[in-house]
Image (cartoon, grey):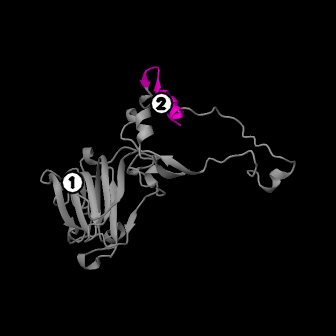
Amino acid sequence: MQSTINDSLPMLFIAGRKSWEMPELTALNTLPPHALTIPFPAHGAVDADPLASPWRQSLNGIWEFLLLPRPDQVTGAALASGEWKPIQVPGNWTMQGFGTPHYTNVQMPFPQMPPSVPDDNPTGVMLLTSNLEHLEWYGRGPWDNYSDRKASALMGRWRSTVTDQYVPYIMPQEHGHKTDVRFLLLTDQDRRGLFIGGQPTFEFSALHHSDDDLFRALHTIDLTPRAEVFLNLDAAHRGLGTLSCGPDTLEQHRLMDSVYRFGYRMRAVSSDVG
């Protein structure tokens, strides 16, 4: 076992270069593409189960897994003395309690340039049905802010509630947005809930009203807060003003690119979160 561990380490370095810093490297220590052939002891046995050959060994199952902070710390000594833990294969190790899952939006180029985007435009909405009422974020606050209205919103660590994000505009409209956010905590009264970290930043709003609620309401009396929390995570948000009651949004604060990409980390937290 020790020899196997040590012999595997040179493959991490290729001609003195770090393999994890080589974008041209698409595979490492893998077999070239080949046709799958499985021998069977008798003609016709493959008809019963094409994978049930006594000479076939599946690699699926429980493996041993070791998580190290950096690629260059994968040494023979570290592997020999590390605390190995079981993991299910196939599987995603960040979804089995190792590290933190990372999420990113999928590129969906528009066939036309904005604002003429297609009606069939896939949109994701996260609906929280638990009592995650408490907000804490590091970003601009404490009040709502947008790309063209954030000079008075200072960077800091802010605390509030989802209920207090509501702004009673006579004509219900977009509100509660936050920009330049490094992280967000959305928890219940026992500090259990969600942590979302930016890569490096994101924008968000958390409300008891859906976008459709705000669009259909003509006056504040038409709005009834929902029990659910509508959490929106954004790469960017158009600035204020849409010619509804004044000038249009300045061009530098409009979303004119056809593709926007952003990522974030999300994990569950308990009462011991800092």
Residue visible at 36% across and 55% down in the picture: 266
Nearer the N terminus, badge 1 or badge 2? 2
**Seen from this angle, which residue lies furthest left?**
152
Q: Is 194 placed left or right of 7 in the picture?
A: left
Residue visible at 73% across and 50% down in the picture: 51
Distance Cα–Cα, label 1 vs label 2: 41 Å
Q: Residues within 10 Å of mark 1 (few under 14, many from 20)?
A: many
Q: Is 15 placed left or right of 197 in the picture?
A: right
Q: Work out which quarter of the rendered image holds the C terminus and state it.
A: bottom left
Q: Is 261 placed left or right of 180 in the picture?
A: right
Numbered disc 2: secondary structure: helix
Relative to 271, is 61 above or below? above
Q: Which mark is residue 9?
A: 2
Between 234 and 11, the one lying in front of the other is 11
Q: Position of residue 138 (x, y in %)?
A: 21, 54
Q: Position of residue 197 (x, y in %)?
A: 30, 52
Find residue 113 and report its image quarter: top left
Can residue 69 be seen here? yes
Answer yes or no: do the residues labelled 1 and 2 have beta carbons within 8 Å? Answer: no
Residue visible at 52% across and 31% down in the picture: 3
User: Is residue 128 magenta-colored?
Assistant: no
Numbered disc 1: secondary structure: strand
User: Is residue 14 magenta-colored?
Assistant: yes
Residue visible at 43% across and 51% down in the picture: 94
Q: Which residue is mark 1?
A: 138
Can residue 242 be seen here? no
Q: Position of residue 73 (x, y in %)?
A: 38, 34
Mark 1 or mark 2: which is in front? 2
**Which amino acid type is marked by label 2?**
Leu
Give the magenta-colored segment's residue range. Answer: 1-17
**Which amino acid type is marked by label 1?**
Tyr
Between 216 and 67, the one lying in front of the other is 67
